[in-house]
Image (tube, helix red, strand yellow):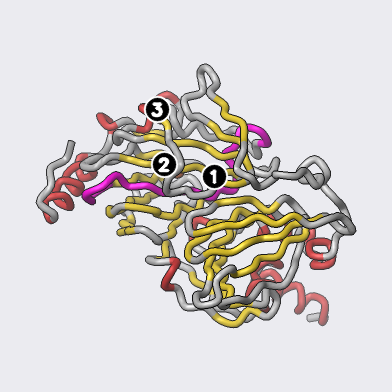
């Protein structure tokens, strides 16, 4: 066998360009279906970032999105960087600030705290600072790096690219001041808020979304003119939402409450994810998933997603609010398997509650 054929053979059994890059970063990589607590994950020294970090390569990411956790030591900052992939950042712990700028133009800096959510505009220089001298600051970032890295497989193109996306960020003052545009479109049941900064996802207003059930409410965010999207969902005590499915890469981060989610493909066994605030899980593409509140307060999560916005959609193939019997991707309560309700009653009973 020729040397070239042997190399090709090795590649055929090998990992993707993205995975190879991530492994070479030398920080812990967590896999599986979920992580219990972003705040408690063990991190490793991350030279490239100048802090401590880990990657989350959970099953449902399917190399559409990845997530990583990064910690900035007290009174320290990370190294500046820019990249040809989009990024959504949620602050898990601490207070600090981020500066952003385009090459050769003035910087602007904004402050954040626990619960702040923002987007780094594509290929814009950015640098994060811990604003406290006695505590670390920790955040989770969800990016579409796997897509762009695997597509272009050239790190200079990804990390050292001079192109400026003026249509995403052109030095606008107040870009991160939390102002925005509210969309309440007739015929579109989910309300949408276009902004680049949410001061605190724990407090942000949500709007009733009857179609998904569970006494639920929601709001979609469009940020930094990107293709990645995010939304908040809240659902009531003693309730569960309807099952639905869509593509991979929706990183669900529990913010409040207690309960579990079920995830399954077709007739296969259902996987149960128990959660509390700080848990992150990603439903695999095409798997049904369903969220159950067993706690004493409304449950709330934020989802950082590969796509799902209306401004720059990547696909419109999924109809996650429409009945699966009519070609959609949602299972109505009356059509769900009897074990779903039975399991919920059992889980509630463990805590002395009844289902609504
Ligand atoms: Fe979903």
Q: Secondary structure at mark 3?
A: loop
Residue 106 drawn above or below residue 331: below
* Residue at (52% x, 17% y) in the render: 186
* Residue ID for mark 1: 230
* Residue at (18% x, 36% y) in the render: 356
* Residue at (70% x, 57% y) in the render: 109
* Structural crowding at the residue carrying mark 1, measured as other residues with C-alpha within 10 Å and reported as few (<14), some (14–19) or many (≥20): many
Could you tell me what secondary structure mostly forms the magenta stretch?
A: loop
Residue 29 drawn above or below residue 162: below
* Residue at (63% x, 76% y) in the render: 76
Quadrant in which residue 48 is drawn? bottom right
Kindly check if marks 3 and 1 are in contact, taking CB atoms under 8 A apart as contact: no
Q: Label 2 vs label 1: CA separation?
A: 10 Å
* Residue ID for mark 3: 323
Q: Position of residue 88 (x, y in %)?
A: 60, 53
* Structural crowding at the residue carrying mark 3, measured as other residues with C-alpha within 10 Å and reported as few (<14), some (14–19) or many (≥20): some
Q: Secondary structure at mark 2?
A: strand
- Nearer the observer, disc 3 or disc 1? 1
* Residue 318 included in the magenta stretch of the image: no
What segment is highlighted magenta in the picture?
293-312
Q: Viewer-proximal residue, 128 or 328?
A: 128
Q: Position of residue 213 (x, y in %)?
A: 32, 32
């Amino acid at each position: 066998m020729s040397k070239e054929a042997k190399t090709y053979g090795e590649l055929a059994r090998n990992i993707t360009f993205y995975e190879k890059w991530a492994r070479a970063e030398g920080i812990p990589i967590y896999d599986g279906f979920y992580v219990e607590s972003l705040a408690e994950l063990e991190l490793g020294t991350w030279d490239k970032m100048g802090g401590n970090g880990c990657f989350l390569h959970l099953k449902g990411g399917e190399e559409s999105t990845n997530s990583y956790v990064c910690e900035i030591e007290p009174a320290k900052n990370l190294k500046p960087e820019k990249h040809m992939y989009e990024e959504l950042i949620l602050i898990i712990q601490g207070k600090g600030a981020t500066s952003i700028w385009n090459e050769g133009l003035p910087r602007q800096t904004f402050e954040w705290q626990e619960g702040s959510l923002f987007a780094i505009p594509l290929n814009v220089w950015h640098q994060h600072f811990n604003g406290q001298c006695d505590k670390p600051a920790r955040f989770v970032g969800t990016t579409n790096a796997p897509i762009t890295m695997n597509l272009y497989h050239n790190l200079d193109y990804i990390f050292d690219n001079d192109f400026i996306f003026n249509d995403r960020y052109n030095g606008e003052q107040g870009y991160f001041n939390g102002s925005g545009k509210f969309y309440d479109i007739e015929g579109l049941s989910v309300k949408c808020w276009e902004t680049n900064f949410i001061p605190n996802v724990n407090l942000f207003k949500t709007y009733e979304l009857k179609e998904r059930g569970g006494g639920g409410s929601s709001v979609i965010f469009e940020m930094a003119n990107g293709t990645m999207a995010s939304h908040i969902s809240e659902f009531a005590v003693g309730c569960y939402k309807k099952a639905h499915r869509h593509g991979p890469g929706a990183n669900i981060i529990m913010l409040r409450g207690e309960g579990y989610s079920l995830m399954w493909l077709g007739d296969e066994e259902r996987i149960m994810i128990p959660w509390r605030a700080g848990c992150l899980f990603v439903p695999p593409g095409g798997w049904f998933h369903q969220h159950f509140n067993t706690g004493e307060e409304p449950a709330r999560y934020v989802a950082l997603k590969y796509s799902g916005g209306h401004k720059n959609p990547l696909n419109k193939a999924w109809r996650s609010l429409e009945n699966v019997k009519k070609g959609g991707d949602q299972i109505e309560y009356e059509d769900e398997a009897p074990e779903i309700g039975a399991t919920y009653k059992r889980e509630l009973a463990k805590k002395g509650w009844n289902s609504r």
